[in-house]
Image (cartoon, helix red, strand yellow):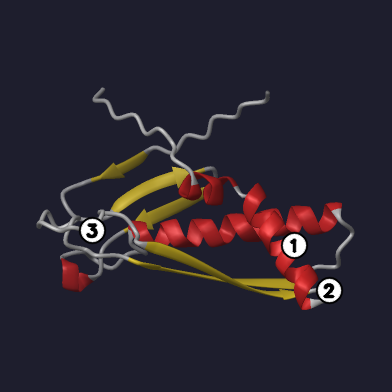
Amino acid sequence: MSTKTITVMASMGSGCAITADIREHHVVIDQPTANGGGNQGPTPLEYFLFSLAGCIGSIGHIAAGQQKIDLRAMNIKVEADLNSMGLLGKPTEDRTGFQQIRVEATIDADLTDAEKLVFLNEVCERCPLHDNIKLATDVVHCLV
């Protein structure tokens, strides 16, 4: 088994903005001004959905190359339903996370619709983020 550890170190000052330097990229997470933020970047939830779309697209590129598919383009829409009561600390019967996440893809390749669906399903099964969402993953919390 080959295990790779990926580490992201993020920092938050007195405001809502959270920053990280990831490889050569400076990224910012923030809240809209209406929620007390400075609107300097997407929210964590938006980045989460973008990460899933990005992972599916990246694995799609890899799988297409392996299968000799001329993948000209792939557009991935990810949307999710959330009851924000839990994250606001208010009582709710719903879980705090997304109630459902939906992935829609448009695949530009010389495949039938049935073949595109098989390809998309295979790609999603190979996507680590899709796997982490679909299956329970231990999350360990600690103070340092």
Q: Is residue 72 visible?
A: no
Q: Amino acid at mark 2?
A: Leu
Q: Where's residue 4, x and y in %?
A: 60, 29
User: In percent of the image, x 27 and y 26: which residue is there?
Assistant: 142
Pick the front one: 107 or 7: 107
Pick the front one: 30 or 55: 55
Q: Nearer the viewer, mark 1 or mark 3?
A: 3
Q: Amino acid at mark 1?
A: Phe
Q: Nearer the viewer, mark 2 or mark 3?
A: 3
Q: Are marks 1 and 2 in contact (CB under 8 Å)?
A: yes
Q: Secondary structure at mark 3?
A: loop
Neighbourhood count class around disc 3 (C-alpha, 10 Å): few under 14, some 14–19, many 20 upward: few
What is the quadrant of residue 115 in the picture? bottom right
Q: Quadrant of the N terminus?
A: top right
The residue beneath circle 1 is 119
Disc on res. 111:
2
